[in-house]
Structure formats: structure tokens, C-alpha cells
Image (cartoon, coloured by chain):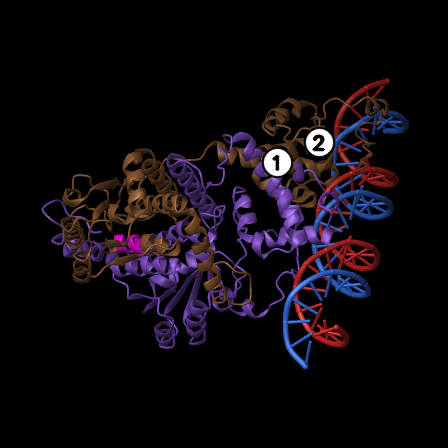
Chain colours: A purple, B brown, C blue, D red
DNA sequence: GAGCCGCTGAAAATAGCTTTCATCGTGTGA
DNA sequence: TCACACGATGAAAGCTATTTTCAGCGGCTC
């Protein structure tokens, strides 16, 4: 099987440093649950006709599984080419494989409990409903994120971080907090990590990096200039660069050796995507943290306890546990 | 689709009246579970090579789902024709459809027996397990938090924030990020909110508060001195004080008019409670935010859009969405 | 031991999937 | 405002995978 994929990845450049994005189809069944999430994640980067196809897929996976490329093209009022393009964007080598995943998904849905659909949070929802809906949405986001996380990239990212001489993390706004969270955690296990939210300082720091260092960019949009620039600087200096983004097609991935994609829950007016992406980002951060802690256990464990001890007296009478 | 079926049903007549044995392809999922049984039932009526194929199918449905006719023929040491014949005998119009059913079956099997048990994350867990376990744990935390949240207190807190002249949020370390998150969100909907992580500045600010202002303390331990002090100062000055804490018996609640309790998931060595409390805290913060946004919708909505507009140009070429 | 029957796989035929390419619409810069 | 460039799109060519055909071969019967 030799799929050329020419049309899908025409950029070419990235390939030199190992193109990210492909969901490393190695696993026997790459969890079909990821499909719905992927559709949502990638929808913004789709063209109109591709969105029509994606919509049909998400709407009736079981039905679509029975259709040939041509049939699906007709049903969605598009062409075979578009259907195949959509399949590629969703991470499958071609329509054939998408169809298999679709069948699997349909089976899972049929087996699994009824979806328990969460309606959008409305302006006049009573507070009790808000809590419930929010919790469910976030739970969904977590499941989606876990399902579509590229384990190969994650492994590589953990490896890079664990062996890094120095780690810089860039993030602005809400993503800035996630960046800080990552840096804080890594510091606690004895790594040299810093989060930068000031764009100028970030770039200033980035140009100090070199091979063996790691730079991490956290951005939901994938194109936040103030975050892309530092990463680019680090990339140019030869540091290993990692992007944690909700948009695998964003500009940030051009300068990222490794990409970890976050998925966003349904957005609503009161709760825009940028705000709900946090959950997903934090899960990724935690995975990175635990991964690194495992790899460097001998140094991480004492470092972790040490930081508790250090903070213990900061708490009033009662028991110790760091905040 | 025009399958001639000549070899399998050479009688010709039956086809006209709807051949039996065909799993009535109309149904969305023709029950893939039946496959194993069918193999057993039909095995006696199979030729030797067909049995070899059927055996392979029953033995490793997931694996076979990935194979083309040719590949399966090779694996079973038979020919394409035999594979197709087997598929027909099993009741599918052709190999293509058998393959779909196979994928569905594999998915069902995978879903049916998921370990589900959230054992502690161990040092030697493979990364894939870590991701799954983490996601499950966090989901559990969210459910727990939502379940035990005191709606009366939440209502009251939302009311206080919505009508506040000025809002101060105190938090240190990991909780400091949550504090910042709350402040950022409230700022976006036009409230005057600030997060303080510097204990001295926090106290300095706290003593400026008075009735009509709101002070929020975020602390997992409930007794972080650097957070309790500012809240106490605010409390003494007559401001409305809110504590978001995991320990409703902590010292912080002594100076809190309102208390929102967060719940923490099981802690493990690699993932101490302080670190996992974040999820719960953030859910509470989001509930507060949405609650306030609902109450002040007329001002909140435009303020929210305004902040997107303001940030839009910060993103490189592609479509807008704030970080 | 010879003839018949039907299983079997090689290869031809076809259906379905993938790629290419020309066209069209849209947004951009002069 | 117009010309230009670029990306999206579908028609059709090209190719792969599936299906069908058909000749050969082995076993079974007489």
C-alpha cells in the first residue's frame, strides 16, 4: 500500500523534522470514539464542502459506513475527491479506513449507553443545570482529548522533556496559565523550567536556547503571534520544540518538532472554545508531567517530597499538603 | 452495487424472493456478535480451505479487519476466491461487507471488556495507561465536585460577585493559577477583578476593600497562611469573603462568608491531591463565571465580544478565536 | 483403474478508491 | 474597480481491491 498523500501535505518543509499530526495508525483499533471529537476539532480548518461531509459522518456514522465513496459524495452533494480529502484530514490514509472506523464507531454507539446529550448552556438556565452541564461537558472534553491524543508524539515529548537541559514554556492569556502550570510541575520534579507570558522576554529567552533544550508553546488558536514567535526563535536555534494546540493546522506547528493536539468541547456563547480548551490542555500537561516523572523517577520522587517539606510550614496548624 | 452472486446462489430463483441467510443488510448494524456463532454453525458445511479462513476470522476479527482479500488469502494460505466464498457463506454480500462487520465486532469486543478500574497510576505504567487513568480520574473528580457543590452557597457567591464593586482573588502556587483564571474570566465580562499571588501585595490590597467588595480565597489545604491572611483582612474590613477550598474545616473558612467546597480525586504518589484539586477548583470557577455572566448578561455579552475583537489581530492569518 | 464431481486458485473483469487536473469562485493588491 | 492569484471543487483518468470466471486437480465412486 503506497498512498502518496501528495495533496494533503504539500508543505514539504515539515517533513524534514518529522511531520506531526498523523495519528500513528499503528494501534489495532485507534479508538473510534475519537472521531466525533476530531470532527469538532478540525471543523474550523475545513472547507465548506468538507464540513458538509464531516457533518454527515458525525451525524450518522452507521449510515455512512454502508456508503461507497461515490454514494457518500452524492448524499453530501460533493465529489469523491472531497470525501477522500475529508477522510485524510480526519487522519485516515483513505476512505476505506475511515469506513472501517465508522463501522466500529457505530457498533460502539449501539453497545454503549445512550449518549446523554448535553444541550448548550443557555442564558436562563438555573444554576443547578449550569453545574451539571458544565461538568458533563468537561468530562466529555477529557474523554475526547484522551481518545485522540497521539501517543507517539506524547512519548517523544516526554522523552525530550525528561532529557532537557532547560525548558521554556510560552503561553498567553488563558493558555498562559496552562503554561505556568506545566512549568510549576516540572520545577517540582527538579527540572529547569520557566513559563514566559511576556512576549519580549519570551523571545529574549528563546534565542538563548540550543540543541538539548526544549521549548513548549501552548496556544488554543495555534496562531497566537506572541507565542508563535518565541517558539520559532527556539526552533531556529535548534531546540526541540513542542506545540500544545487545538489547531494542528495552525502556524505554530510549522515550527514544532512535536505537536500535541487538544480537543475542544462544544462551544456556546457563554463558554467560547478558547475558554473550554483549558481542560484539554491541562490534561495534556498532566500527562506530560506524569510521563516525565516516571522516566526520571529516581530524581523526581525526592524532589517532589522536598517541595512538600518546604511548603509544609506555610500552612496553619493543620496537616501539610502543598497548594 | 450489483453483485451477481452467480456462484453462490446459482439457483437464481431465490434471489427474486429475498434470499434467506442474508443478514437483512438494511439494519444499521447487523449484529456483529452473531459472527462467531455463525462460524461455528456453518463450519461443518465448509470446505477445508473455507474453514481455515473462518478460523482466522473467528480467532482474530480485529486483525482480519485490517487485511485486504489478498492479504487474508495469503495469511490463510488460500486464494481470494475462497475468502470471498467464505464471506458469502457467512451471509455477507461480499468480503467488503464482512470486513465492516469485522471492524464493528472488534470495536464491540474492545468496548465490552474495558479494564475500567482506575488503579493508581504506577511508576511503570505505559504512557497509554497513564493517559486513560488520568482522564478517568479527572472525570470522576468533576462528577464528585458537581454532586457535592452547595447550590445555596453558589447562588449567593454568584450574587455577590455580580454586584461587586471590586473583586480580589488570592491564591498561591497551583491555586494561584486558578485564582488568575477566575480573575481573567471576570475581567472579560467587564468586572473589576484582580488576582494576587504576592502575599504582601495581597494583604495591602485586601485592606483597601470594604462592604460591597468581594474577596475570594482559593486554597486546597484550606490553611495556606499567605492566602488566609488577605482574606482575613478583607473580612475584617467588611468585604464579602468567599473561600474555594478542599477543606471546609480549614482555618480559611473562619473568615469566609461563603464557602465552596472542592473535592479531590484519589491521590497517588505521582499525583498528589494538591495537584489534582485543580480540576475541581476550575469547575467551581467556571460555574461562578457562567453564573455571573448570566446575571449580568446585558453587560457581559458585549464585553465578551469586545475582548475577542481586541485579540483577533493577535493571531496570524487564519480565522479568529481568542486564546 | 477410469470417470465424475466439486474444491481450489490463477487470472480476467469489474467496482470502488485515489489522484490529477482544469475550472470556478473568492479575496487581495494595484 | 479591475486584474491577479490562490484555494476550493468536481470530472475524469488511473490504480487498487474485490469479484467472477474458468481450467486444473484431487478425491471418491463404480
The residue beneath circle 2 is B92
Judged left or right of residue A223, residue A286 is: left
State whether the magenta stretch is mostly helix, strand or loop.
Answer: helix
- Name the residue nearer the viewer: B180 or B64: B180
- Name the residue nearer the viewer: B302 or A177: B302
Judged left or right of residue B90, residue A117 is: left
Q: Position of residue B44 (x, y in %)?
A: 67, 23
- Up/down of A113 relative to A151, above or below: above
Judged left or right of residue B159, residue A86 is: right
Q: Position of residue A35 (x, y in %)?
A: 55, 45
Give the Cα separation between the discs numbered 2 and 1: 11 Å
Query: In which quarter of the view is residue B142 placed?
Result: top left
Secondary structure under tag 2 reads loop
- Name the residue nearer the viewer: B202 or A59: B202
Looking at the image, is mark 2 or mark 1 earlier in the sequence? 2
Decide if residue A55 is in sight here: yes
- Name the residue nearer the viewer: A242 or B77: A242
Q: Which mark is residue B77?
A: none
Secondary structure under tag 1 reads helix
The residue beneath circle 1 is B102
Quarter of the figure that contains the C terminus of chain B: bottom left
Mark 2 vs 1: CB contact within 8 A: no
- Up/down of B246 relative to A194, above or below: above
**Magenta span includes B62:** no
Query: In which quarter of the view is residue D8 placed?
Result: bottom right
Q: Are marks 2 and 1 on the same chain?
A: yes
Query: In which quarter of the view is residue A157 placed?
Result: bottom left
Magenta stretch: give its range.
B174-180
The chain to which mark 2 is attached is B
Amino acid at each position: 500500500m503506497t498512498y502518496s498523500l501528495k495533496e494533503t501535505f504539500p508543505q514539504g518543509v515539515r517533513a524534514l523534522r518529522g511531520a506531526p499530526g498523523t495519528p500513528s495508525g499503528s494501534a489495532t483499533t485507534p479508538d473510534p470514539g475519537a472521531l466525533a471529537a476530531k470532527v469538532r476539532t478540525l471543523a474550523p480548518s475545513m472547507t465548506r464542502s468538507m464540513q458538509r461531509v464531516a457533518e454527515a459522518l458525525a451525524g450518522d456514522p452507521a449510515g455512512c459506513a454502508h456508503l461507497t465513496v461515490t454514494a457518500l459524495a452524492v448524499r453530501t452533494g460533493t465529489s469523491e475527491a472531497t470525501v477522500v480529502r475529508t477522510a485524510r484530514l480526519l487522519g485516515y490514509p483513505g476512505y476505506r479506513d475511515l469506513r472501517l472506523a465508522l463501522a466500529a464507531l457505530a457498533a460502539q454507539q449501539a453497545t454503549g449507553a445512550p449518549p446523554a446529550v448535553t444541550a448548550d448552556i443557555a442564558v436562563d438556565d438555573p444554576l443547578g443545570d449550569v453545574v451539571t452541564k458544565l461538568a458533563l461537558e468537561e468530562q466529555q472534553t477529557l474523554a475526547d482529548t484522551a481518545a485522540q491524543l497521539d501517543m507517539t508524539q506524547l512519548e517523544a515529548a516526554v522523552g525530550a522533556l525528561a532529557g532537557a537541559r532547560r525548558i521554556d514554556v510560552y503561553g498567553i492569556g488563558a493558555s498562559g496559565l496552562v503554561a505556568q502550570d506545566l512549568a510549576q510541575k516540572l520545577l517540582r520534579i527538579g527540572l529547569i523550567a520557566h513559563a514566559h507570558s511576556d512576549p519580549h522576554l519570551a523571545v529574549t529567552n528563546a534565542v538563548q536556547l540550543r540543541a538539548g533544550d526544549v521549548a513548549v508553546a501552548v496556544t488554543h488558536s495555534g496562531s497566537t503571534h506572541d507565542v508563535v514567535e518565541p517558539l520559532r526563535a527556539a526552533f531556529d536555534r535548534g531546540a526541540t520544540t513542542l506545540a500544545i494546540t487545538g489547531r494542528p493546522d495552525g502556524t505554530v506547528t510549522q515550527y514544532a518538532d512535536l505537536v500535541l493536539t487538544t480537543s475542544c468541547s462544544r462551544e456556546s456563547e457563554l463558554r467560547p472554545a478558547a475558554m473550554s480548551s483549558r481542560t484539554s490542555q491541562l490534561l495534556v500537561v498532566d500527562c506530560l508531567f506524569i510521563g516525565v516523572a516516571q522516566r526520571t523517577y529516581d530524581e523526581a520522587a525526592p524532589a517532589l517530597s522536598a517541595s512538600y517539606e518546604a511548603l509544609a510550614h506555610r500552612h496553619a496548624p493543620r496537616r501539610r499538603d502543598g497548594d
